Amino acid sequence: MPVDPQSLLRELFATAIAAAHPSQVLEPFLPADRTGRVIVIGAGKAAAAMAEVVEHCWQGEVSGLVVTRYGHGARCQKIEVVEAAHPVPDAAGLAVAGRVLKLVGNLSESDRVIFLLSGGGSSLLALPAEGISLADKQAVNKALLKSGATIGEMNCVRKHLSAIKGGRLAKACWPATVHTYAISDVPGDLATVIASGPTVADPSTSAQALAILARYSIEVPANVRDWLHNPASETVKEGDQCLSRSHFQLIATPQQSLQAAAVKARAAGFSPLILGDLEGESREVAKVHAGIARQIVIHGQPLAAPCVILSGGETTVTVRGNGRGGRNAEFLLSLTENLKGLPGVYALAGDTDGIDGSEDNAGAVMTPCSYRRAAQLGLSATAELDNNNGYGYFQALDALVVTEPTRTNVNDFRAILILEATAP
């Protein structure tokens, strides 16, 4: 039976999400001894789903508090779930961060803490450093999101403006034993970068945070600049005693999801090419993907069709216009513009958390007919890209991918399906 390209793309996306879902990956990593009291805290888009797993598996006394993005909650019985804003923190995130610190602030050596961490935790667990207001952090965060800064650069600044990130949460838990279980949403899976590393040593410095703000010409209030010049703004460094009982474990990564999608593609008769975690401007990353797709269609290199190009990571968007759409819609719009209906090429780009930027879609799908159909509707891919309007473009084509919140997050997923086709 012939493969329906759009259905297969959606199946690959679903497979990638399932491979990173807490219900599938967390339980084997939990401590072998699950008796006795444990305090569970957590932050991120997968935090509530992770908390559900702990409640189900733990045999002793369980209590705690986790924060997740609005709409990403779960029905926990023993662990309180609070929802807050992402990607720009709000008062709910501020309040719950303070409560988390208070919850772990008076522990002893005999206490155990489980910290459930996933993408989005940096914004959701927002507690500004002394002398910095939530409004200050919100303004800096918004400016960083629009600047084109990488996730690593953004988190460097966030850590040094925080009372909880950059190892400071582990310091608050000391001398209790802390087990951090993390789902990675960042290229390279660095513990220091995932949600700004609340329980691990941080190698970045306040001077680097200042340099990032200067690099992207981001103006900040005098109190923020003064704080970053203050030695107290430095994060917890390697060798600090407070980290000696803090243990970090990755339980899911973008690579695992890409590999799961590759297995699914191979079973459907498509050779997979995994490009891995990628960074850079969404529209520029799309140009590279378009070049690879074109080379496959015309020359059968670096592999022959039928095949699928898979990639993940987190691209960035420098806001130029007033349109709607996140990183994935921007990527797909640029891909559409560059391929201009190249026969036999289909693509899906989506965020594995189910939300592309701040929209209600996870991503979108492109077909060989997308460019022509949009032109018939009076839509120019070039003009819409100039306006950052990927959402509007694919909404007009009825090509948005809507999943609702998935309650996990290994960041972006991109699949370009190439059928056997004759070059134009």
Image (tube, grey):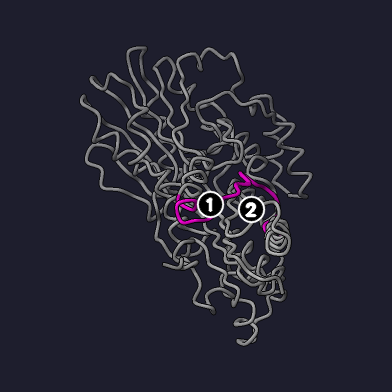
Instruction: From the top left corner, tell me how far across and down residue 159 is, in percent.
Output: 60, 35
Where is 2 relative to 56, above or below?
below
Give the SS element for disc 1.
loop
Which residue is found at the position 53% from the left and 66% from the top? 364
Residue at 65%, 70% (x, y): give it. Answer: 336
Residue 134, percent from left and from top: 54, 46
Instruction: Give the camera-side residue of 392 and 200.
Output: 392
- Circles 1 and 2: CB distance less than 8 Å? yes
Quick check: 399 left or right of 22? Answer: right
In depth, the one of 165 and 105 nearer the eye is 165
Q: Which amino acid is tagged 2? A: Leu
- Mark 1 or mark 2, earlier in chain: 1
**Up-down relation of residue 12 to residue 211 (above or below):** below
Q: Amino acid at mark 1?
A: Pro
- Front residue of 77/333: it is 333
Q: Which residue is mark 2?
A: 145
Q: Residues within 10 Å of mark 1 (few under 14, many from 20)?
A: some
Q: Is residue 240 left or right of residue 387?
A: left
The residue sitting at 49% across, 40% down in the picture is: 256
- Quadrant including the N terminus: bottom left
Distance between mark 1 and mark 2 Cα atoms: 9 Å
Q: Write down the region rendered in magenta.
A: 264-283
Q: Which residue has dot 1 on it?
A: 87
Percent coordinates x, y for residue 375 in the rendering: 65, 84
